[in-house]
């Protein structure tokens, strides 16, 4: 089995590469721009977010995407 790594993105900025999905999600939850009501579970800006272009994303090194929560 391949060693899967998780890449975390905020808009077009890469926040880091993590060994587990839990670590990747923790990185997002600790980011200063993250507020649970401002983002959907897929990471896109919700209707409450004043910046509609803001988003978070988690992808593994094989290209699969994951929910942020």
Image (cartoon, rainbow, N blue to C red):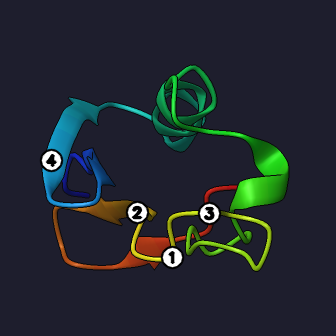
Along the polypeptide, which appears first: circle 2 or circle 4?
A: 4
Q: Are marks 4 and 1 in contact (CB under 8 Å)?
A: no
According to the picture, the residue beneath numbered tag 3 turns out to be 50
Q: Nearer the viewer, mark 3 or mark 2?
A: 3
Q: CA distance from mark 3 to mark 2?
A: 18 Å
Residue at 73% across, 71% down: 40
Q: CA distance from mark 4 to mark 3?
A: 19 Å
Along the polypeptide, which appears first: circle 3 or circle 2?
A: 3
Instruction: Using the image, determine if residue 19 lies above or below residue 58.
Output: above
Instruction: Using the image, determine if residue 60 lies above or below residue 3.
Output: below
Q: Find residue 16 and report its horizontal and vertical position in percent.
A: 21, 32
Q: Residues within 10 Å of mark 1 (few under 14, many from 20)?
A: few
Along the polypeptide, which appears first: circle 4 or circle 1?
A: 4
Along the polypeptide, which appears first: circle 2 or circle 1?
A: 1
Position of 38 with respect to 65 (left or right) is: right
Residue at 42% across, 64% down: 54
Residue at 67% across, 63% down: 49
According to the picture, the residue beneath numbered tag 2 turns out to be 57
According to the picture, the residue beneath numbered tag 1 turns out to be 52
Position of the N terminus, as image quadrant, is bottom left
Q: Nearer the viewer, residue 38 or 61?
A: 38
Q: Are marks 1 and 3 in contact (CB under 8 Å)?
A: yes
């Amino acid at each position: 089995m391949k060693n899967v790594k998780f890449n975390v993105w905020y808009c077009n900025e890469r926040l880091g590469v993590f060994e587990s999905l839990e670590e990747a999600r923790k990185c997002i939850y600790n980011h200063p721009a993250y507020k649970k009501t401002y983002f959907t579970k897929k990471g896109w800006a919700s209707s409450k977010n004043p910046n509609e272009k803001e988003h978070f994303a988690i992808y593994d090194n094989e290209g699969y995407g994951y929910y942020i929560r």
